[in-house]
Image (spheres, helix red, strand yellow):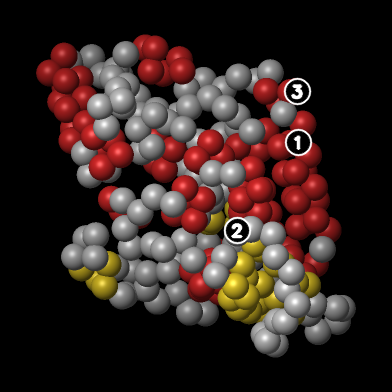
Amino acid sequence: AVVALSGKREAYYTDYLGTPQEFVSAAKYGYLYQGQPYSWQEAQRGTPTFGIPPEAFVAFIENHDQVANTVTGARIRFLTSPGRYRAVTALLLLGPWTPLLFQGEEFGASTPFLYFSEVGDEKLREAVKKGRFEFLAQFPSAASEEVTLAVPYEIETFRRCKLDWSERERNHAFSNLHRDLIKLRHEDSRLCQQSKGRIDGAVLRSESFVLRYFDEVIDDRLLIVNLGGREELRSVPEPL
């Protein structure tokens, strides 16, 4: 999701393309790496997940690691377009997995989330700072002269990360989007009981795909996601 939304493929994002096929595979199998070679670590990664129910997998657009590792602590919605962000949010909340929302994501929090750590020992504080800066060196974007890394143990670093709760009242568009999607997920049996049904997916175009939720009692559900430009599907040679 990070690669698809931001276009950045660096450090541990190197082995992802952000393509529709990856989203389809994640919906069907949970984890993408189930023993294949993983070039970033120069080793095989993961184990097979076949047969494990979809709700056993926790999926998210962002968490504390991904946000803090943007160096500036920027949330993913500021690294992409509003349309792409809404599309992936819908996928997150209507997908077969168990969705996770990172603090404030549900109301469009704009506050950053930086790496912060407070320890009493001066040497340890400096060691943590040095280790953090060395870790972020794997991201070429962090080497920019315009980027100033926040010092982990400074109190201001922590304060900048505190949520602005007034945004809950101001950002109605984000709150309503999440409420509507969660309501749909809760009320539609085809979306909330995937372990009892079946899901499949297919790529439609270079940036769009479809997930089909099968149900033997009522009509199936289609979730069509487009992360690209507007287009008319005049011809769709895809059974799903």
Q: Residues within 10 Å of mark 2 (few under 14, many from 20)?
A: many
Q: Secondary structure at mark 1?
A: helix
Q: Is residue 132 visible?
A: no
Q: Residue visible at 25% across and 27% down? A: 145
Query: What's the residue type where badge 3 is placed?
Result: Glu
Rendered image: mark on residue 220: none
Query: What's the residue type where badge 1 is placed?
Result: Ala
Q: Which residue is mark 3?
A: 169
Q: Residue visible at 28% across and 50% down? A: 11
Query: What's the residue type where badge 2 is placed?
Result: Leu
N-terminal-most mark, 3 or 2: 3
Q: Which residue is mark 1?
A: 173
> Foreground mark, 3 or 2?
2
Q: Is residue 50 above or below residue 188?
A: below
Q: Is residue 220 above or below residue 81?
A: below
Q: Residue 189 at what x, y percent from top left?
A: 80, 67
Depth check, front residue: 26 or 1? 1
- Cα distance, mark 1 to mark 3? 10 Å
Q: Is residue 83 above or below residue 114?
A: below
Residue 34 placement, left or right of 144: right
Q: Secondary structure at mark 2?
A: loop
Q: Is residue 155 visible?
A: yes
Q: Residues within 10 Å of mark 3 (few under 14, many from 20)?
A: few
Q: Residue 217 at what x, y percent from top left?
A: 86, 81
Q: Residues within 10 Å of mark 1 (few under 14, many from 20)?
A: few
Rendered image: mark on residue 227: 2
